Amino acid sequence: MVSQNYLVFVSAARQLCGVEAFSRLLARHFGARAETHVLDADMPGLVRALEGRDAVVFNFPIVGWKRQLFTPGLAAVLARLMGRDVVVFLHEWLALDWKRRIVLAPVVLCATRLAFSAPEIADEFARTRFARLVTRRRQVVPIPPNVLPVGAEKASDISRALSVQRQGGRLLLGQFGSIYPKKQSAIVLQVAAELVRQGHDVGVVFAGSFIKGLDNVEENFFASVRDLGLADRVTVTGYVAGDDELAAIFKEIDVFCYLFPEGLTSRRGSVLAAALSGHAVVVNAPLEANALGHHGLFQRLIETHAIRLVPTEADIPTVAAAVLAARQEPPEPLDAEAEIAKLWHSICEGIDA
């Protein structure tokens, strides 16, 4: 194994998407062997930044690069001309707009190594004709949570309001992460409505915000809230900047719940973050048996019952019953810090290899 020095590309954005958060954490865990560099049109600056570096690392898609049409390709070509390794992480592929894939194609063609965030992404990429033109040096890399457990909690108006509900005996069902159609957030509303129908006092907390640019997502969501009779039971926090404020919100949630069209996959960092909060996560099982085989942290969380799997096609009453059971049986203790450190060690070791 050869230890390399890396230049990890990031954007200048202050509000980070999950992919960019991974980029910055990756550089941090490589320590002195990595530096971050804001991807821009300053090619002379990039030449200087490449001095003493063996490889550059791209992560796609980073939201902050949406308007960067030619810069990534130019940076990749320059790195290759200077004899540097080009490592490209693809966190999505076919899910990207075709125009975005065209923009990324030159970077992928320049790649000396390709890393995928999940076996599903690697498989869908391998099935494309484009895959025949690029490097066969490919690997699947487990992606750690971007939001880490913190010791400190900072109360906010939202967490205090949730605490009042919980002290009154209300079961708080939660989701963490952005709200968008593919996440099927509205189905969790149906689980809550089923529990209310059974006579339970239930509230739903969405610790996140609606993805901008998608038509009618917020309007359709709140229409479902009204149709299900949950108007006084749903809290949407919006974007929470501080991990300590987020920890205070997580503390008030009894059980997290997710139902994905494809079942749980290792790409669901929001599930990881929720499970590491110390509260159980009820989620539907992966479609593919090997979906989590490369990800040690997901496997540990399942072993300790922090993640409780229901059938992939589970109906609403089945999920509701699992939520009630999870509320009564807390997860086994887990040394989250040690498990996350172990995961990052395997990631850095795998990239070096």
Image: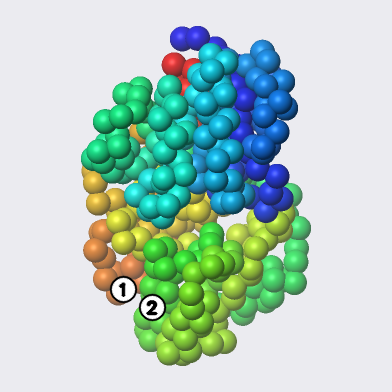
Q: Residue at x 71, y 26 (%)?
A: 44
Is 173 rendered above or below residue 332? below
Locate residue 329 relative to residue 131 in the image: left or right: right
Classify mark 1: residues with Cα within 10 Å, few (<14), some (14-19) or many (20+).
Answer: some
Where does the image place residue 176, in percent across and percent down from the top left?
Answer: 54, 60
The amino acid at mark 1 is: Ile
Q: Residue at x 53, y 87 (%)?
A: 231
What is the CA distance from the residue labelled 2 to the residue labelled 1?
A: 7 Å
Check disc 2 and report its element: helix, strand or loop: helix
C-beta proximity under 8 Å, tags 2 and 1? yes
- Asked whether the viewer can see residue 308, the reply is no
Classify mark 2: residues with Cα within 10 Å, few (<14), some (14-19) or many (20+).
Answer: some
The amino acid at mark 2 is: Gln
Disc number for residue 190:
2
Is 319 rendered above or below residue 11? below
Tell me the quarter of the image containing the C terminus: top left
Locate residue 314 relative to residue 34 in the image: left or right: left
Residue behind mark 1:
316
- Asked whether the viewer can see residue 271, the reply is yes
Which of 222/328 is in front?
222
